[in-house]
Image: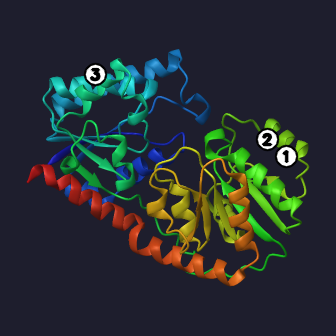
Amino acid sequence: MKKILFILHLPPPVHGAAMVGGFIRDSKIINSTFTTKFIDLGTSASIQEIGKNGVKKWMRFLKIFKETITSLLVFRPKLVYMTLNSHGNGFYKDCLVVLILKIFRTNIIYHFHNKGVADYQDKWFDHLLYLLVLKNEKVILTSPYLYYDIKKYVKEKNVYYCPNGIPIIDDSPSLIKKDNDKVRLLFLSNLLKFKGLFVLVDACKILKTRKVVFQSVVVGGEGDISKEEFENIIKQNNISDVLFYVGRKYNEEKAAEFKNADIFVHPTLDDCAPIVLLEAMQFSLPMVSTFEGGIPDIIQEGKSGFLVQKNDATSLADKIEILINDELLREEMGAYANKRYATHHTLAVFEENLVSILKAPFN
């Protein structure tokens, strides 16, 4: 079998790229189709460490560097699959790994789970690195909506598209009937500003002012917003009776939050293809999110949910209010979302697409 070295993010911490990395590492079809070896590219032990420097992170990076060289010498892969950061310190770190791959003249295929190349390409140093790293290489993106980000460096003929997929939860019914006294909104993410958490706060305040009857639940661990800070913001905006923070939830408790929700809200400011939207689709939830990254490929406007402009709390509140007031529309959109998940975003579909892509360089 053909040998592939996977250099990718693995949990912990738990975020989109790490979740996908875990699916790939544990995939029976991938491991039975290829001879595989895996190196964890992550240097952050927690969400709070992401984007920061430290001695421990450099020690982890040196371990990655050593494992990469050893694997190239001993394992001798025919292809290296790498989840490349798009910018910042993570990208600079990754460039050192890529340099080793280039020295060994290895065939490389990159898989982007974030974006930002277009934001940094006009800086001379980053531009030179992008030329070094991306020129003539193959790239996997989650959506055609994201091609603009790498267009300057990668020809579209060298781009593969592979939408994310997640496992089927056996006890998740295809259409979940709710019996809530109040329509229940769900926001599920770590407490991060770029996920649009403050936009949700403003939208909840607007809905309360309009005397709309609802409740909103925020599920997730602390990020760049602490529990204390977020709870104070809720109190300051006088929405403690409609917006509740319940902390982290995993496994059955997390599934219960999806099952108890009526509407999924994800007003993100910076995303590519959020895994959490696929989870909401699996639980037959209508969604309200933003025109951001590859999200328009996941949420079909007016069919499985609504999309609004980023940082627009009024429009977010408007769309949420439409769904709150129309139970039939919620059910129709939720059913469409679930059907879309089953045909496009299961883990099996993702694995089949990825295997097909990884076979291509060997042909």
Give the residue displayed 61% in from the left and 71% down from the top.
286
Q: CA distance from mark 2 to mark 3?
A: 41 Å
User: Which badge, 2 or 3, comes first in the chain's sequence?
Assistant: 3
Q: Is residue 85 visible?
A: no
Which is in the foreground here, disc 2 or disc 3? 3
Q: Position of residue 308 (x, y in %)?
A: 60, 58
> Outermost residue toward the left?
363
Query: Which residue is identified by label 1?
Result: 234
Query: Which residue is identified by label 3?
Result: 128
Callout 1 touching callout 2 (CB < 8 Å): yes
Q: Is residue 310 visible?
A: yes
Q: CA distance from mark 3 to mark 1?
A: 45 Å
Q: Nearer the viewer, residue 149 or 356?
A: 149
Q: Amino acid at mark 2?
A: Phe
Where 199 falls versus 298 (above or below)?
above
Q: Nearer the viewer, residue 183 or 8?
A: 183
Give residue 230's mark: 2
Q: Position of residue 302 (x, y in %)?
A: 56, 73
Q: Is residue 217 left or right of residue 136?
A: right
Q: Is residue 304 left or right of residue 131?
A: right
Q: CA distance from mark 1 to mark 2?
A: 6 Å
Residues packed near mark 3 inside 10 Å, few (<14), some (14 to 19) or many (20 plus): few
Quadrant of the rendered structure where residue 164 is? bottom left
**Numbered disc 2: secondary structure:** helix
Q: Position of residue 115 (x, y in %)?
A: 43, 40
> Outermost residue toward the bottom?
328
Give the residue displayed 40% in from the left and 74% down from the top.
343
Where 217 falls versus 62 (above or below)?
below
Q: Position of residue 214 (x, y in %)?
A: 82, 67
Residues packed near mark 2 inside 10 Å, few (<14), some (14 to 19) or many (20 plus): some
**Numbered disc 3: secondary structure:** helix
